Image (cartoon, rainbow, N blue to C red):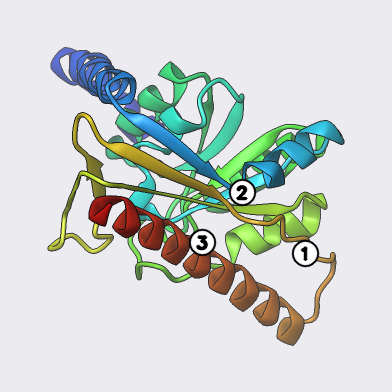
Amino acid sequence: MDEKNNKISLKQRFLFWFLPLVISLLQRFIGVTSRRIDIGKENLDGLKETGRSWIFSIWHTNVLYSPYLNRNMNVAVMISSSRDGEYITNIVERFGNFGIRGSTSRGGLKALRALIHHLKKSGCAAFTPDGPRGPAFKVQSGIITAAANSGVPIVPFHYECTRQWIAKKAWDQHRVPKPFTTFIVSYGKPIFVPPALPEEEFEKARENVERAMLDNMELCRQKADELRKA
């Protein structure tokens, strides 16, 4: 958090600790009462076998459970510098990952440089390329810049659940799993972005990642629909 946000009350500090604790316990409860089906896990396993790092590309609609579903990977997650981001950071850390604070509106360039440095040291990272404010399901440029400068591939990630609430009035249509659900978790094929792309090729790379993420999301939705009908 920045200097301004460091001036917080004792009550706020308590909430920063307490609410992530409650949320993470609820996530663990739903996780242990549910089933998980992986799609495309071989895409991730192939990178692990060759010792490569990667960048998870995750729509904002999936931001709640992605740290749990990818726990204990030491993934660096780009998280907003806002106070809401403090809650997210604490949850991410409870699942064995960590936050790098910054967004398109504040501290973004410094955070992006820190994340690229982490990637070059063989660490993994995660972006919500349509966050923090949308528009939903539209890839912004930061993740393409990170991949081009680090040489690390982008892996589309998405989950849907057979039993879930969808916040239809929220800009990101957020998914909230219900207990005793089945998680369908999909890892797309790695996407490599060449370095030093001219503007036109950069835009093509952005569109390619966006299309791959939308396809990955649709694959998850179709599988969830099949299971609901079975």
Q: Residue furthest front?
A: 230
Is disc 3 placed on a helix, strand or loop?
helix
> Taking the image as drawn, is residue 174 in sight?
no
The image quarter containing residue 21 is top left
What percent of the width, then of the height, locates residue 25?
26, 16
What percent of the width, then of the height, locates residue 144?
66, 63
The residue located at (54%, 70%) in the rendering is 210
Q: Earlier in the sequence, mark 3 or mark 1?
A: 1
- Residue marked by disc 3: 216
Q: Give the CA distance from mark 3 to mark 1.
A: 18 Å
Q: Earlier in the sequence, mark 2 or mark 1?
A: 2
- CB within 8 Å, label 2 to label 1: no
What percent of the width, then of the height, locates residue 46?
78, 41
* Left or right side of 131 for 213: right
- Residue marked by disc 2: 40
The residue carrying pointer 2 sits among few (fewer than 14), some (14 to 19) or many (20 or more) residues within 10 Å by Cα, namely some
- CB within 8 Å, label 2 to label 3: yes
Q: Amino acid at mark 3?
A: Asn
- Residue marked by disc 1: 193
Q: Give the CA distance from mark 2 to mark 1.
A: 20 Å
Q: Earlier in the sequence, mark 2 or mark 3?
A: 2
What percent of the width, then of the height, locates residue 122?
79, 33
- Select label 3 or label 1 by which is in front: 3
Q: Give the CA distance from mark 2 to mark 3.
A: 10 Å
